[in-house]
Image (spheres, rainbow, N blue to C red):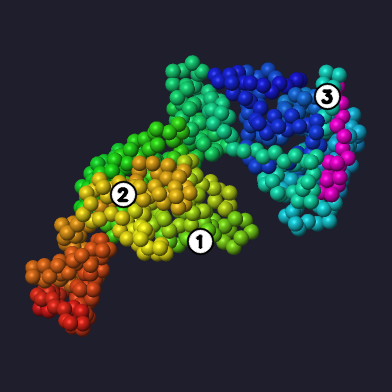
Amino acid sequence: MTVRVEAPQVPSPEMPVMPHFLRELCATLPVHSQFILYGNIRDRFLVTPEGAARPGLLPLVPSLWVTLRAHGYDCLVVYDPVDRLLTAPAFGANPETVRKAAEELLPGIRWDHPHTLKELEPVLTAVAGGGARRRAAFVIDYASRIAVSASQMREEERVLFRFAEKLSQVAEPIAGPPERPERLFNPVIWLVEGERDLPTGMVKGNERIRPIGIPLPDLELRTAAAELEAGRLGLGPGAPQAEEVVRHFADQTDGMTLRAMHEVGVLAADRGVDFTGLPHAVRVYKFGIENNPWQSDHVRKRIKDGERAVADRVKGQPEAITKTMDILKRAALGLSGAQATSSATRPRGVLFFAGPTGVGKTELAKAISAVLFGASAKLVRFDMSEFSAEQAADRLIGAPPGYVGYEEGGELTGAIRRNPFQVVLFDEIEKAHPKILDKFLQILEDGRLTDGQGVTTYFSECVLVFTSNLGIMVTDPADPHGRRKIESAARTDPYPELARKVRRAVADHFTMELGRPELLNRFGDNIVVFRYIDEATAGEIFDLTLGNIVRRVHDAQQITVGVAPAVRERLREWCVAPDSLVNGGRGIGMALETRFVNPLARVLFDAGTPSGATVHVTAVRQDGAGTVSLEVR
């Protein structure tokens, strides 16, 4: 049986079937005696055997055999150090022919029988030493498992690697049969997870050993695999929707292996759906969740009804609320990043809240979490001031292997895997280390992140919220030491002018200070600018906060508190004063805590007020030392 490896007979005639790493291996067989294949080695690969109308998905070892057989190789000898088995698989070729070639190459060898590492030396010599009478290749699968680590080996392991190193230098290429007379090596092919899984001394400076990385499949290969899976589910090449279905499936599976794409097709078939069910099967495969909240009418109704509730909760920010709700509506329709070539895997929504401190940025993030996923939904919040050191990235995605905390995983990736449908808040993003910001590039562009344990987490169903005070306080150009900060925008600036200044300051920070213009581009027009708290809004926040305090006293102590109008107005004057508004709504809360909560607690505690009592605050006064006291009855 002969095998060809060429373009598949699929709707995309330009699609290459042989993966690039196999092309590289074949092209360098005349000059390299050994190869190290690392990376995505457990995937399946598109190859087309002779006589097949379409390509098939094959594991790596069968793919190597199909490729090498097309170059005149008679057999493939495989050693598995886990089971210590030596085999000569046929993979579709005539088994008798392959076994005969293997037995002539290795007479008297015990096939499908455990072999020690020492027993491999004569096998390696017979196959790859240069004196072989047949073209053959030797594949060492699971080579990363031969030794516990490249720096901690037993004697028999060190002997094997030294032997292989020397063999790589003394091996010679051999001529093929008359129909393929070119001189090629009988290669030794090591299959490892990482490029450095083999001893450094064996490969460093050794030009006879060629490392070849196997990447995740690109869009071209995913499109070919998408055609295969859609075809298995009933999509004919001439169907009107064929191109759109295939394109969307290939986009959705960005970052996934072809093996995973096949398993998505298996999930769809298991549910008895046709090719139109592939998008849902991708979501089930990624998240293990059948029901997608984003596709329910319930979420859309909550967004529609929630606009008024958000405005009641976040005071004085009509522009910010309107833009935020527009982005949420876009997210509910799956249109986030719709202008991009490939947007299927990006987060559902991205928001960058910028503006003065204490104006409702964090509160709005909490409000949209309640709108989308219910009042009981807990916002996942990360205070980025805790991530000012470069190594703090380990907290987000987990420590690399060998480091303390490796087994614990990452706080961010773990939280998303536990619940992929949620709002994630990154508070005060400008305080994070610039290296940590690079992690967000992959999340914003590809919607995924691989943690320290090599597990991929998908963010395509999340809403990400970043907050920042950038643009409000800037370095005073008149200060020669660059230490003094001044407000870049006046409180009296009209909103369009304020928004312009803040957006310009945000752009300058990411491009000039951080040198990360690409991150700014990922945020795009999703920068939502908050205005300063004015006096009218401060009054509304005061009423809301005072009501919360009274309600908290009743809930905690079952004590009803009444506040006289004169007391309320006096407290309002204190809370909306300019010195209180410096910290926005948060300053109003701090002022009420000092001038009302503390003296009220003093009165209730000292008087031993019992549960069920009603207390009326009739007067409030402040002495010369600034101590506030209340009169109650």
**Which residue is denoted by mark 1 in the rendering?**
389
Secondary structure of residue under mark 2: helix
Label 1 CA crowd tier, 10 Å (few <14, some 14–19, many 20+)? some
**Which residue is denoted by mark 3 in the rendering?**
182
Pointer 3 or 1: first along the chain:
3
Q: Amino acid at mark 2?
A: Lys
Asked whether residue 115 is in view, the answer is no
Residue at 54% x, 19% y: name it. 11
Q: Amino acid at mark 3?
A: Glu
Secondary structure of residue under mark 1: loop
Residue at 34% x, 47% y: name it. 503
Q: Is residue 20 left or right of residue 436?
A: right
Are the residues flagged by discs 3 and 2 in contact, CB closer than 8 Å?
no
Are the residues flagged by discs 3 and 1 in contact, CB closer than 8 Å?
no
The answer to whether residue 326 is above or below residue 102 is below
Instruction: Work out which residue is located at the far bottom of the displayed protein and give it.
Output: 606
Residue at 62% x, 56% y: name it. 401
**Mark 2 to mark 1: distance in Å?**
29 Å
Pointer 3 or 2: first along the chain:
3
Q: Is residue 277 left or right of residue 533?
A: right
Residue closest to the eye, 11 or 577: 577
Label 2 CA crowd tier, 10 Å (few <14, some 14–19, many 20+)? some
Label 3 CA crowd tier, 10 Å (few <14, some 14–19, many 20+)? some
Residue extent of the magenta highlight: 161-177
**Horizontal and vertical percent position of residue 218:** 57, 33
Are the residues flagged by discs 2 and 1 in contact, CB closer than 8 Å?
no
Instruction: Work out which residue is located at the far top of the displayed protein and give it.
Output: 238
**Horizontal and vertical percent position of residue 268:** 49, 32
